[in-house]
Amino acid sequence: MSSRACGSLSGVSIAPEPWILHVDAGAFLAAVEVRRRPELRGLPVVVGGNGDPSRPRQVVATASYEARAFGVHSGMPLARAFRKCPQAVFLPSDHPVYDAASAEVMAALRSFGRPVEVWGWDEAVLGVTVADPEGLAQEVRARVLTQTRLTCAVGIGETKERAKMATGFAKASTERVYRLSSANWMIIMGPRPVTDLWGIGKRTAARLHDHGIGTVTDLATADRDDLAAWFGPSIGPGLRALARGGTSRTVDPEERLARSRSKQVTYPHDLTEPAEIATQVAALTEDVCGAVFAEGRAVTHVGVIVRTSSFFTQVKTGKLPMRAAEAEPVVTKALEVLGRFEITRPVRLLGVRVDLA
């Protein structure tokens, strides 16, 4: 019998147990670029915008591990990334190539015949029942590498939350696999700050600190009623459950239809003329509609995002009188929504979002 189905230790049979494997193809966009340009291997690579760090208002989408060693990270302006690492290779984002590479990775994961829930280009979870989850995780890594020439790390846990957080440890390990389970959760995570928990940011951590909660153990042992009073009846107890390792155990392999589609553009120079702003909103709307209608979907609502030079951002929406399957009525509604803004400063960013039937 396969060790995947039954293991043994000193002659004692180990029964298969349910586990979740979180698979993360780290620095994915940079890795895909290196795959198609092998001469870049080992070099600092930065992907983002049109790849020109001299052009303003562009940000890093992904940096290779070599670039991260210089302090470059996602979300950083390209110009700042260039100052930190001028020797880096700067490349434009190429979404169709990343879509295709992601599909390859997900196909490799699905080839195991287990449910796969896709979380993004480079992330997914598998639901498995095995006696040796580390062994299967290494098989997953090997198959992804063989079929895609891309590497990944795998976190193992009884819940999605534990598996996701285990991946952080996996990336730092030589095996690139790590397990966080009920057996070691509090030992490993308990002394750590609450910001080490997936989903807890600085603001929530600051609020917790105000109530004397600084570590994962503090949060795991906090009073449920107190947390509910401080954060609300759902969020408060949910934070406590997260500190205990989370509760999400179901892997949903169904591909969900997107409920909305959007596009935003940060302009190299601020827009000041109303006619130019309207032209850009119309063009954004047509671009979004083109992708939506190509999929046979219809539009029910349209929203317009305006961010001024002061970084003040507003969003306004409008409902179409009926579902639209062509761009003209959606553009008309978008311009009508735009007319509801009082724009008194130059515009830095515009965006359009459509809700889908």
Image: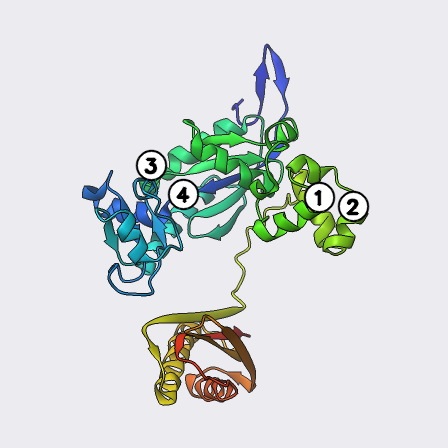
Secondary structure under badge 2?
Answer: helix
User: In the rendered image, which quarter contains the C terminus?
Assistant: bottom right
Mark 4 → mark 1, Cα distance in angstroms: 29 Å
Residue 221 falls in image quadrant: top right
Mark 4 → mark 3, Cα distance in angstroms: 14 Å
Residue type at numbered disc 3: Thr
In the displayed structure, does residue 71 sit left or right of residue 45?
A: right
Closer mark to the observer between disc 1 and disc 3: 1
Residue at point 37% right, 76% down?
287
- Rendering coords of residue 69 (x, y %): 33, 39
Residue 277 falls in image quadrant: bottom left
Mark 2 → mark 3, Cα distance in angstroms: 47 Å
* Lower sequence index among marks 2 and 1: 2
Give the number of the disc on residue 146.
Answer: 3
Secondary structure under badge 1?
Answer: helix
Residue type at numbered disc 1: Arg
Residue type at numbered disc 2: Arg
Residue under label 1, please give it: 240
Residue under label 2, please give it: 224
In the displayed structure, does residue 140 sit left or right of residue 276?
A: right
Residue under label 4, please give it: 25
* Lower sequence index among marks 2 and 4: 4
* Lower sequence index among marks 1 and 3: 3
Closer mark to the observer between disc 2 and disc 3: 2
